[in-house]
Image (spheres, grey):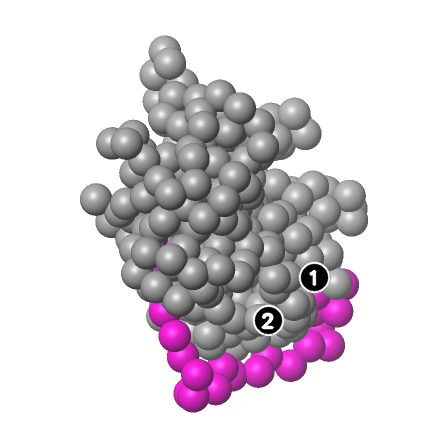
Amino acid sequence: MRVVFMGTPEFSVPVLEALVSAGHEIACVYCQPPRPAGRGKKDRPTPVHARALTLGLEVRHPISLKTAQAQAEFADLKADVAVVVAYGLILPQAVLDAPRHGCLNIHASLLPRWRGAAPIHRAIMAGDTRTGVCIMQMEAGLDTGPVLMRRATEILPEETTSALHDRLSVMGAELIVEVLAKLDQLEPEAQPVEGVSYAHKIDKAEACVDWSLPAEHVDRLIRGLSPFPGAWTLHDGERLKLLASRVSEGSGDAGQVLDGALRVACGTGAIELLRLQRAGKGAQDTEVFLRGHPIPPGAVLRGT
């Protein structure tokens, strides 16, 4: 098929690669514009942009698709279908209608649960035990379109957003290839009215750990916000980013370090911190971290 691909972050890259490997003709790749990054603050292309260039594909990165010119240029591609995954721009109706088979979105949740911007983070933070990927026909509403195919997976007990992100990215790539191969045979299924929830964009204000909460809640916050923006706590006035954890046994004052393995008491129960990061330093497993930054039993970690 003649495909327009629309995506921006690392999550989208395996999908683009899968479409190319399956033999589809990529008419054009749309992504977000390069933005300043790194120490020199030089413009850096997005992961999709960089991969598309290595594949020899045409890349466009308009700031908006709302202008008549942008919409005409999109329509001139005469695509059979557009595949959209974490693109970052709202698609006007003229764009949604331009491809012969419309626009298909790869969404990292089991719709209608977790419509919106941060479905992977929110699933872990809410304590969901299952999630998955849906291929959805796009319409004007936010992730409201009918679903062509879905695939579910378990969320593992110690899984972080980073690890689940990588698994769902591969699942989405496999699923969209399957959908395109069967597109004329699939019957779109309207999303149920019941069970709708919204995965609002992560606010950095959510990242401060409240040690008075039960251990399960603290653990889910840490795993759900790893690696970005990263849950954090304070030790001796220094902010520490917490990147991996697991629920453990133990009790004490909220935030109290219980042993030399960084087991920390919560409102009920305790968690074991598995990976941490100091400001300006690299992330380290706990054993390595403690060699250079000892935190003795009895110390208290605080949220503010």
Residue 147 position within the rendered picture, expressed as x and y whole percent measured from the top left: 56, 75
Q: Is residue 197 or residue 3 the one in the foreground? A: 197
Residue at x-position 50% and y-position 44%: 259
Q: Is residue 177 or residue 226 the one in the foreground? A: 226
Magenta stretch bounds: 179-202
Residue 155 position within the rendered picture, expressed as x and y whole percent measured from the top left: 61, 64
Residue furthest to the left in view is: 304
Per the image, is 145 magenta? no
Mark 2 vs mark 1: which is more N-terminal?
A: 2
Residue for badge 1: 175
Question: Hey, which quadrant is residue 37 in on the image?
Answer: top left
Residue at x-position 47% and y-position 36%: 276
* Residue 49 visible in the displayed image: no
Say above or below: 179 vs 2. Answer: below
Q: Is residue 71 or residue 218 the one in the foreground? A: 218
Question: Hey, which quadrant is residue 238 in on the image?
Answer: top left
Say above or below: 108 vs 169. Answer: below
Residue for badge 2: 130
- The kind of residue tagged 1 is Leu
Residue 249 position within the rendered picture, expressed as x and y whole percent measured from the top left: 53, 61
- The kind of residue tagged 2 is Arg
Residue at x-position 45% and y-position 64%: 269
* Residue 40 visible in the displayed image: yes
Q: Is residue 251 or residue 239 the one in the foreground? A: 251
Name the main secondary structure of what is drawn in magenta: loop
Residue furthest to the front in view is: 298
> Quick one: quadrant of the C terminus?
top left
Mark 2 lies on a secondary structure that is strand
